[in-house]
Amino acid sequence: MSNKQASEQVALKARKVSFSWEETPLHWVPGDPFTTHTINVLHLLLPAGERWFVHVYKQVLPYIRDERLREDVIGFIGQEAMHSQAHDEVLPHLKELGLDPTPYTAQVDWFFEKLLGDRTLPPGRARTWWLMERVAIIAAIEHYTAFLGNWVLNAEELDRCGADPTMLDLLRWHGAEEVEHRSVAFDLFQHVDGGYRRRVRTWATAFAALVFLWQRGARFFMENDPTLIDGRASFKEFYVRGRRGTLPATGEMVRSIPRYLSRGYHPSQEGSTEQAVAYLASSPAAVAALAAEKGTL
């Protein structure tokens, strides 16, 4: 382990945050439905995806032979479960505003619970292979959640646009925890398997799935937004917003690919634990959660 990796290790704990959505408008990035709905896809993907992470990691705990890593994985499980719940709670608010996400979330649930879910495999090599395959897929997905977490912590253009502060706090609290625990999934994969060919293969699976589900989700939101006539999502719109700074830049996303596929890759190279911890110390939701935990509210 490098000095940087060692110095950046922090004890992971779930913060029991809560958010109030009554004041959040449908287009929480003012005048920009496309940016709003592209980011809103997180609320559709993450509840099912992070429940799936937790389910897989509970199965892999018996394979962990390092006590520090086991503690990190347990902390990761707690944080991911909280992320799932926090994003899930946005969906009823969207429904009240006339945008029912149920048809899309049903597809996402099928993807994680059926396509990537447990299979009726005999105990032994086949079952272990499928478990390790999913551990590797999670490591690849976490590369992108850390990338997005680092991006949103630094997305000052969203503040300049007047984005809803409650939604920004949800995204940045979540993003900061993704940066905080960004090494856990990769370290776990290296610990239980670490095969380079598997890393490349599962990266391709994860990347293709994320791109497919994300563009499908953005299109779903734009087409079903009750305030839009002929609402559409396109790659050109994504590219333009990336240049503007309200969405991740396409070039930055492309450059993140060879980093993950490099044999010398480690997630500690991505983002800053110091910045993440600093945000979590000032996040309104995280501060309120800490105060509630200490019984001072």
Image: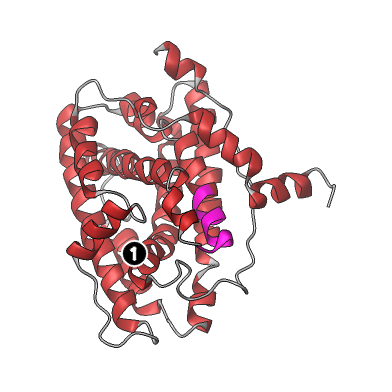
Quarter-of-image position of residue 120: bottom left
Queried whether the magenta region covers residue 171, the answer comes back as yes
Q: Is residue 120 left or right of residue 197?
A: right
Question: Measured along the vertical axis of the image, is residue 234 above or below residue 140?
Answer: below
User: Picture coordinates of residue 72 (x, y %)?
Assistant: 51, 31
Residue name at image x 55 percent, y 48 percent: 173
- State which region is magenta: 163-172
Question: Measured along the vertical axis of the image, is residue 21 above or below residue 138?
Answer: below
User: Picture coordinates of residue 239 (x, y %)?
Assistant: 22, 57
Question: Measured along the vertical axis of the image, is residue 29 above or below residue 243?
Answer: below
Quarter-of-image position of residue 85: bottom right
The residue that disc 1 covers is 38
User: Picture coordinates of residue 78 (x, y %)?
Assistant: 56, 44
Q: Is residue 51 left or right of residue 269?
A: right
SS at mark 1? helix
Q: Main secondary structure of the magenta part?
A: helix
Q: Is residue 66 or residue 278 the one in the foreground?
A: 278
Quarter-of-image position of residue 125: top left
Q: Is residue 144 or residue 82 the one in the foreground?
A: 144
Question: Measured along the vertical axis of the image, is residue 224 above or below residue 267?
Answer: below
Amino acid on which disc 1 is placed: Thr
| Res 148 visible | yes
| Res 120 visible | no
User: Picture coordinates of residue 245 (x, y %)?
Assistant: 34, 52
Farthest right residue? 296
Farthest front residue? 160
Queried whether the magenta region covers residue 10, the answer comes back as no
Residue name at image x 53 percent, y 61 percent: 167
Q: Is residue 131 or residue 16 the one in the foreground?
A: 16
